[in-house]
Amino acid sequence: MKYFFLLFTIFFSFYSTSIKAEALTLKQIVNTAMLSSPVIRNIQGNIEVAEEAEKLVSSYHYPVINFTQSLMRSDNPVNVFAFKLGQEQFTMNDFDINALNNPNPRTNNQSSFTLFLPIYAGGEISRKHSAVSKQLESAEYQKAWAKKIVRRNIYTLYYAIVN
């Protein structure tokens, strides 16, 4: 392993000295700076977040369907009493004091579908959509401004070196 590392180091040192720097034009420098600028990448991330938020807000117009299922088994007198009432299986014999205090275990199974459809939300959805659209527009303006700043800084440094 030690020899491999030594040979690799020697090969890389000869290889790296044979690499020649290529001349870049000002346009290439600016394009490279635009692609590698962390400020622009950060703002691009903000734009992507705002675009996803816009998709999320537009989904508020769609209906939401929920399904719930609950299964409960108990011999607790209060629960058994409630289960029998809920299942409409309560009889006069269930008022017997011994049956009330020492019930047989009972199972209750409940299923439900719920549909939530926004009919009127008081303008809340449109306000959220407007806010997210403004956020996206702001991020795009920030990106354009950051590109101008990067371009100006590259030009300033380039002409400072050339002159």
Image: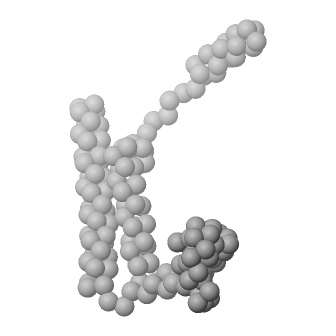
- The image position of residue 162, as x and y in percent, is 28, 33
Residue at far front of view = 97
- The image position of residue 87, as x and y in percent, is 60, 86
Relative height, residue 5 to residue 147 (above, below): above
153 and 47: which is toward the camera? 47
128 and 40: which is toward the camera? 128
What residue is shown at x 58% (from left), y 90% (from top)?
92
- The image position of residue 60, as x and y in percent, is 41, 79
What residue is shown at x 57% (from left), y 70% (from top)?
101
Q: Quadrant of residue 130?
A: bottom left
Residue 14 shows in this picture: no
**Is 64 displayed left or right of 90 in the figure?**
left
Relative height, residue 66 to residue 20 (above, below): below
What residue is shown at x 70% (from left), y 13% (from top)?
5
19 and 121: which is toward the camera? 121
Relative height, residue 98 to residue 146 (above, below): below
Q: Quadrant of residue 158?
A: top left
73 and 41: which is toward the camera? 73
